[in-house]
Image: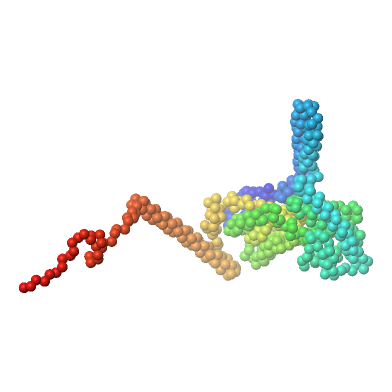
């Protein structure tokens, strides 16, 4: 990896010891240190490496990638040849046993041989270097034919556009007319309804090409052809599309230097404009595509950073004092710049946001220490800024820059240096543990679970120069922390009460069922109702009639 943890012993210099004492840190603790040699390509070419390229620079990574790919192709080819030999031997053995029994099987054998040859040829084509998969190759050939027909139909439109661009008067068509002309082209990726930013970038690109005269025509033509080719390659993986873009950058740069004899400074400017023009149009197709797991990684990193919201500058040995108003402003600007990176569409503009963020960090460290910042101070501060800002779609932006940025910017210069440090910061955050922050595992687990938070600075320890607003802010944070703990206890007790009620209900239900099973309810038939005394007794009609009252004479 590009970072490692280094013990800071007690033999530090006096300023270092005083600074550690001021931050109320232990005399011996773990600090974040990065050796500058570890930021470079591990192959030793002198360029900056990248974790996405396994520690190589873009140039060495492509070389290693092609070597591995050629090796895999060779192994697949050997496998295909071995399968072919085995099939031929099996067929020859079966054919020799049969001999020449009958001519009736001659046509059958010929048909079988032709079928065998076709299968072997198909296997060879499957493992050949010129194709990736059989179905994909057919789709590519079909799209290529369509693209060739489209380019033939669009030849007149391209020539007309070139004439309008490079006329001696250099009078360009209005944006509305340019959009109408582009709408006639067959490729939806090039001639779709452009946004305001796309129109502005296109106009700036054409204005820039006017200064290159004849090379500008070639640049314009190559960019148009590349955009159309990328439209037909959308079914490819994002790594393959990235390789196409990197090949295009390299070919255009070499052509400008060798064929048109353009100076290196102008080549760099031209490559920046080319990247801006093509990536503005390809952005929505190649940034965080659905075929990758970039979005999943974004959510994992975002969740990880939210869980680490409790990390303080003292834990990371950040030499920044946010109580100083100028330093606080620099920290806010750095956070704003790293968040603004997601709103940019061009890799170079995203790199510019990272560079501005890093420069604000260096200024904040310089104001705090009253001396220039070192690399050992920069990386932990950058980690702290990333934790505070929690930039949206951080992994997607890093992958987008890695895949489609002009490789020369990532290999050298301050942009490459700051971008490599950002990759190191993200890697450190993903692997941050209790030992890295000089905490016990128990405290680290409690902080991560939200059961408690690090103790804030007590009010009696504030210096008299501290702003009242800062004191009130920390007081409110303490109150919110207490309320959060109370709320968690209430929620825990409520869940416990809910479980108890469920257990009580289940117990009562079980008891009732046991009683019902032990004493089952028997339903007897309804008894016949008794007849009334004065009703006619039909069943007992044989009884003597009732006595009638008789009157006796006295």
Colouring rule applied to residues? rainbow
User: Is any part of residue 337 visible from this angle?
Assistant: no
Taking 106 as reference, is 7 left or right?
A: left
Foreground of the two, 409 or 513: 513
Residue depicted at 58% across the width and 55% down the height: 25
Residue depicted at 34% across the width and 55% down the height: 523
Quarter occupied by residue 375: bottom right
Foreground of the two, 216 or 448: 216
Q: Residue 233 in the image: x percent, y percent? A: 78, 53
Q: Residue furthest bottom?
A: 554
Residue depicted at 79% across the width and 39% down the height: 118
Foreground of the two, 154 or 495: 154
Q: Residue 496 in the image: x percent, y percent? A: 45, 57
Taking 324 as reference, is 92 left or right?
A: right
Vertical arrangement, residue 104 with respect to residue 330, above or below? above
Taking 113 as reference, is 1 left or right?
A: left
Vertical arrangement, residue 334 with respect to residue 27, above or below? below
Q: Residue furthest right?
A: 168
Quarter of the figure with the C terminus: bottom left
Foreground of the two, 470 or 67: 67
Residue depicted at 79% across the width and 28% down the height: 102
């Amino acid at each position: 990896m590009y970072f490692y943890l280094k013990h800071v012993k007690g033999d530090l210099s006096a300023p270092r010891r005083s600074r550690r004492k001021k931050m109320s840190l232990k005399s011996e603790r773990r600090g974040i240190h990065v050796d500058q040699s570890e930021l470079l390509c591990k192959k030793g070419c002198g360029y900056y490496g990248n974790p996405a390229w396994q520690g190589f620079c873009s140039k060495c990574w492509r070389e290693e990638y092609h070597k591995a790919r050629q090796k895999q192709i060779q192994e697949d080819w050997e496998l295909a040849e071995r399968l072919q030999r085995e099939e031929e031997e099996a067929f020859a053995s079966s054919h020799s046993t049969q001999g020449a029994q009958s001519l009736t099987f001659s046509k059958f054998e010929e048909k079988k041989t032709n079928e065998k040859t076709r299968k072997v040829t198909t296997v060879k084509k499957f493992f050949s270097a010129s194709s990736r998969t059989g179905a994909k190759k057919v789709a590519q050939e079909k799209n290529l034919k369509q693209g060739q027909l489209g380019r033939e139909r669009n030849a007149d439109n391209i020539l007309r556009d070139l004439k309008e661009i490079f006329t001696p008067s250099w009078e360009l068509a209005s944006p509305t007319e340019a959009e109408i002309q582009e709408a006639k082209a067959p490729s939806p990726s090039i001639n779709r309804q452009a946004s305001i930013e796309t129109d502005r970038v296109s106009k700036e690109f054409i204005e820039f090409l006017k200064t290159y005269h004849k090379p500008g025509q070639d640049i314009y033509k190559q960019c148009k052809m590349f955009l159309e080719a990328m439209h037909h390659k959308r079914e490819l993986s994002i790594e393959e599309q990235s390789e196409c873009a990197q090949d295009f950058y390299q070919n255009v740069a070499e052509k400008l230097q060798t064929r048109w004899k353009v100076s290196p400074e102008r080549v760099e400017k031209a490559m920046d404009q080319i990247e801006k023009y093509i990536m503005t149009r390809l952005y929505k197709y190649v940034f965080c595509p659905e075929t990758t797991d970039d979005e999943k990684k974004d959510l994992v990193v975002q969740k990880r950073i939210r869980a680490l919201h409790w990390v303080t500058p003292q834990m990371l040995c950040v030499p920044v004092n946010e109580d100083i108003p100028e330093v606080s402003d620099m920290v806010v600007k750095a956070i704003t710049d790293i968040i603004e990176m997601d709103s940019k569409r061009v890799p170079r503009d995203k790199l510019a946001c990272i560079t501005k963020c890093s420069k604000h960090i260096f200024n904040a460290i310089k104001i705090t220490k009253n001396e220039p910042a070192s690399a050992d101070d920069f990386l932990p501060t950058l980690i702290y800024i990333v934790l505070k800002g929690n930039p949206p779609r951080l992994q997607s932006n890093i992958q987008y820059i890695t895949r489609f940025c002009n490789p020369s910017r990532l290999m050298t210069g301050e942009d490459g240096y700051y971008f490599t440090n950002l990759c190191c910061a993200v890697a450190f955050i993903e692997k941050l543990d209790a030992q890295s922050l000089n905490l016990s595992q128990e405290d680290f687990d409690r902080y991560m679970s939200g059961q408690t938070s690090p103790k804030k600075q007590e009010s009696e320890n504030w210096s008299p120069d501290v702003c009242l607003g800062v004191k009130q802010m920390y007081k409110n944070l303490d109150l919110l922390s207490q309320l959060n703990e109370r709320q968690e206890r209430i929620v825990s007790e409520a869940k416990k009460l809910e479980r108890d009620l469920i257990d009580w209900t289940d117990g009562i239900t079980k008891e009732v069922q046991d009683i019902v099973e032990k004493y089952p309810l028997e339903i007897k038939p309804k008894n016949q109702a008794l007849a009334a005394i004065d009703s006619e007794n039909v069943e007992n009609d044989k009884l003597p009639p009732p006595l009638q009252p008789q009157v006796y004479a006295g």
